[in-house]
Image (spheres, coloured by chain):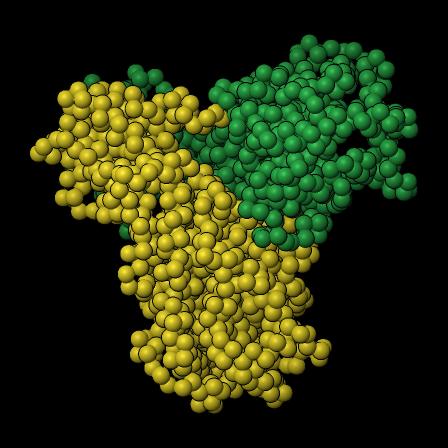
Chain colours: A green, B yellow
Amino acid sequence: MASLTLSHAALSSSTVPRHGSSTTLSIPTFSGLKPTSSRALTRHQLSATRRTVTSTRRRVISNAAVETLQKTDTALVEKSINTIRFLAIDAVEKANSGHPGLPMGCAPMGHILYDEIMRYNPKNPYWFNRDRFVLSAGHGCMLQYALLHLAGYDAVKEEDLKQFRQWGSKTPGHPENFETPGVEVTTGPLGQGIANAVGLALAEKHLAARYNKPDAEIVDHYTYCILGDGCQMEGIANEACSLAGHWGLGKLIAFYDDNHISIDGDTEIAFTENVDKRFEALGWHVIWVKNGNTGYDEIRAAIQEAKSVTDKPTMIKVTTTIGFGSPNKANSYSVHGAALGAKEVDATRQNLGWPYEPFHVPDEVKKHWSRHTPDGAALEAEWNAKFAAYESKYPEEAAELKSIVTGVLPAGWEKALPTYTPETPGDATRNLSQTMLNALAPVLPGLVGGSADLASSNMTLMKMFGDFQKNTPEERNVRFGVREHGMGAICNGIALHSPGFVPYCATFFVFTDYMRGAMRISALSEAGVIYVMTHDSIAGAYKVAVESRKRPSVLALSRQKLPNLPGTSIEGTSKGGYTITDNSTGNKPDVILIGTGSELEIAVKAADELRKEGKSVRVVSFVSWELFEEQSDEYKESVLPSGVTARVSIEAGSTFGWDRIVGSAGKAIGIDKWGSSAPAGKIYKEYGITVEAVVAAAKQVS
Amino acid sequence: MASLTLSHAALSSSTVPRHGSSTTLSIPTFSGLKPTSSRALTRHQLSATRRTVTSTRRRVISNAAVETLQKTDTALVEKSINTIRFLAIDAVEKANSGHPGLPMGCAPMGHILYDEIMRYNPKNPYWFNRDRFVLSAGHGCMLQYALLHLAGYDAVKEEDLKQFRQWGSKTPGHPENFETPGVEVTTGPLGQGIANAVGLALAEKHLAARYNKPDAEIVDHYTYCILGDGCQMEGIANEACSLAGHWGLGKLIAFYDDNHISIDGDTEIAFTENVDKRFEALGWHVIWVKNGNTGYDEIRAAIQEAKSVTDKPTMIKVTTTIGFGSPNKANSYSVHGAALGAKEVDATRQNLGWPYEPFHVPDEVKKHWSRHTPDGAALEAEWNAKFAAYESKYPEEAAELKSIVTGVLPAGWEKALPTYTPETPGDATRNLSQTMLNALAPVLPGLVGGSADLASSNMTLMKMFGDFQKNTPEERNVRFGVREHGMGAICNGIALHSPGFVPYCATFFVFTDYMRGAMRISALSEAGVIYVMTHDSIAGAYKVAVESRKRPSVLALSRQKLPNLPGTSIEGTSKGGYTITDNSTGNKPDVILIGTGSELEIAVKAADELRKEGKSVRVVSFVSWELFEEQSDEYKESVLPSGVTARVSIEAGSTFGWDRIVGSAGKAIGIDKWGSSAPAGKIYKEYGITVEAVVAAAKQVS
């Protein structure tokens, strides 16, 4: 659903960029920003300030605006903030379902971010150089919907707010990137969002280092995130934030909504660690905004300070009151995840001085926010012009970046994949996988990835590149450490940063258990992450995985050597299941043997035995149930004719699910108990994953 | 496989305990312990010192031993440490598989723990009041096997060391509690072990608070753990350690093997956070032993200091050299996970001055360790006597504790479970679950547990108890915060502390994805954790779950109200699948409708419709595929006769796996796509989880 973010016209334009021209760079006429800190600039701050004329100029103008701040402005800011609060209150009330507490508490930081800080184009939510925002505490999504609505995003009109949590609406109960343009990633399961944000910030830092030139800062945006106490408790958040600190992701700014309330009550009952100190230990810059409810200038100053620290991510701990404004429910669990109820809504209206009807946006607030549409268009136009100039000066880099930005893979990339014949000596598929990755890396500019401390075992290094590290962010091998869950979620963030990214990540197959939360979100949010873990026709598997930009792929690879079996092919692999050998006629073999990955060889050998005894045997390589399901009925019938119920599958894993393939009359050979510690050959024998077992089963069913 | 840890004879004995008698409390004649710190004792230390005469006396005697330390002792210590190193080297070499690096680096701390610090009885690995040891870095298991061997555990004889990683051996490639008595928990997947250790320490603190008396400290042991860089990177470790700090688990002492090497090389590439500071932030006491290779006194002093801090867990960061002693491979990845190779083994023998044959334990080392057999027996005998005295004075508490220690549930406990009739008003099964828990809590002394910040939603509070907290550890409601993975692993630790513990933990069913790593280990390691998430006959489900002390159970509960359907029963539930209504004769219904949990009601209504049209219909409640599989063929045939292939299943979940039950000719109704945000009724309708859909499918297949 994510449309391409750059029109080809814009990309091929050679217009000279109009740096700082007042017609293209529309500076907000309103800003609540006050002078924040008079401390001397650090060397980092100075270098950040110097980076480009454009960004310096914008900052200076903003600062000028600060000094003309009028009292009326603060009143308007408060009105805007209360608009956000009541849109959330009203939508949850109408749905009689949802989470009003977070939007009410986080409305001030939300307002400041979307109205004063972030650069985006509401009419093109996919503009490449936009700032990214992630609501890691996804249950508070009415905050984000209200902000998208005020900012002018077409996905969230008033009627969409009124359809909150209803069938088919653009405003589901948790933010979904594939439903609501303007939402960057799918959040809800706690901790995923902050890890996605780390991936988004990694992507920016990487692309900036790879493509920016001294005279053209073509990649330059921030990643903002709001996370709550729940996110902070989740291990995945610590994993990802440890990496963010390690990588020095200076343009990642996370707001920790420190409201001391979680579902079971005060966080005192389960969460008394010193979060600030932990983040400092993780290598973050930490700022505490003590009054997140009305300390707007504190929030603004914190963001300025965060931007001035360019070598570390920043966590701004913002102490807020959950359900701020509700006289009887604020600062309690009751406001977290249920509608306030008509009586308390009235009380809150009275308390905050809000005389309007539900869903009403006061005119002055509407007018104030309306500037984001022209401003956003100008920001994008400016960038497009800048890119056009870049392209004419650096055509090679521009072509690569364009592929990453648009998701159009370079023509003929798949020709880089080596192919094999039965004469090619056998090898472990993990080794073949490494060959594939190293063949693809030069032709796929968006291929980045790595392993959770098993690169040498997963064979996932791209040998022509170095490590993505704090001081070498242009490199493409990512070292995730032993952090599987964080790794998966970071890759989701990379995948969803730009459609041409092809992130891969690797670990042992069994540790999919550790990152299942992230893998589920890959599938749900259409993030085409490649999980490197095998299968039989390895080249085919990579072709499918690279082409699958909207769903994740798992490659489960062998450690032991496997032969190149006759009949295996890239084409067959792409169908999920296909016949590799058959001595039957009329689509009526006596028996069908179905092998997968490392067990395909056993099926082939068993077929040889059975054919010696005069049987007609088909051998099917079955690499993906899902891909096979998607084939035509004719194709499926050609591989697994319904008339042939004598079927045996063999896989060195649980037989769970194979019944659908082998049917009631067939037999699934597998391992329905725990593994053991012994040499591989011994284990295969003891568990009955053998030619003899397949032959016996085939005789039994046929 | 865990045998009972107290003989009934011992438990019923009324012998007066012989505190400090030199015949029963055999003090090690050797100790390398030196005076460590002369700082004034804190109030906590003083109160800890005063707690019992016995423990004070033991400590004093140890300190006396310190002053008689001889030079020859250090030589003997080194010999013992090198014995451990070479047993690991030789076993890995013989298997040509395994991890020598950690045992070589951690041998000093291992020696000190098992030889000088820990209290255990090698001839009864299940003695209740033993100190627990967890090797969280489970790949380094040869360290533990070598220590168990030297300490005199029967499970690890010399021939077992020689069978390392072989089929059927007691020394598999990672430690397995169900294979090797002396191993407390199953480790290998990184981070699980430290979380298990938190659970073990929680169990001790809880039981001590509940059962100790001013005159009888019947529960008093430590939990030690060794974890590596990999464990430290895993989110689960941070989750569990945050809780350990929150709970103030003063008798948890973790050794962080800080060797700066992980599989992909120097930890600098992915792990540069300040671990000490993070642990301080988590509320731990942190000590750094800079020379873990030869600084034996540093290690000893650190342990003494750790014991003196009774209100916080302690992390002792021990900087070691991985593969210490190997001249060419130490301090490199190459020594982590592969045999050294004959040449390097020789070089290491030469380097460490080790002239012995493989697997040789020098006589003086053997002699030195031999005292642990009589000493351990004495420790247990002393405790048994103490318990007998306790029992005569506090019979009620003793009976409860005995149930927890032995795993024999109080007679008639299951009578506490309420039962329901079709006339009982419908209710959400999560509410019924709460009724069950509250009915069981008074009769099951080992029932402890809680939720990952969803207690009010999972309905898991035991209302008659307070919260297990730092200062109220005698209470039984555990507040895990939003830490699912850590929660599961902590419950594994509780379950494996003593066989009568019945730990339960709760979250939304979908978040099993977050704790799958721990759930897998529950099943593998025979930890009978109850995962509270539903099903139809809720009382029956709890009966099965409580009785399943060697495998985990998942209860997937409804949020919405469900009726008490006629025909459902505790007995039927225990069989996994059973007929609840049937209007057929001769075991030949026209069609079988199979419902599960909240969808059983739909199956019943569809049956009503079909029967009106003259069909004979059987309705089966299918609550557990696994339990059904375990029934006799006769029983299975009586519920799902092979002659009746017209079968329809209905479950509001993936249809994956249902093929085995409904067969090729049947139909599985379910949801093979993502969920949506809308009111429940609307979603059921849109996804076709309806009476109409079941009726249509039934007509199609019959």
Residue found at the very far left of the displayed protein: B586
Q: Quadrant of the N terminus of chain B?
A: bottom left
Q: Residue at x 38, y 46 (%)?
A: B433
Q: Quadrant of the C terminus of chain B?
A: top left
Q: Position of residue A494 (x, y in %)?
A: 61, 31
Q: Name the residue rendered at 47%, 86% in the picture.
A: B19
For residue A273, side relative to residue B481 (left or right): right
| Towards the viewer: B76 or A570 | B76
Residue B35 shows up from this direction: yes
Name the residue rendered at 34%, 77% in the picture.
B11
Question: Which of A406 and B557 lies nearest the eye of the viewer?
Answer: B557
Q: How many marks?
A: 0
Quarter-wise, where is residue A446 in the image?
A: top right
* Image x and y of residue A613, in percent: 15, 34
x and y, in percent, of residue A338 in the image: 55, 34
Residue A48 position by quadrant: top right
Horizontal placement of A31 versus A266: left or right? right
Is residue A582 visible to the viewer in this orientation of the structure? no
- Residue located 60% across and 69% down the image: B310
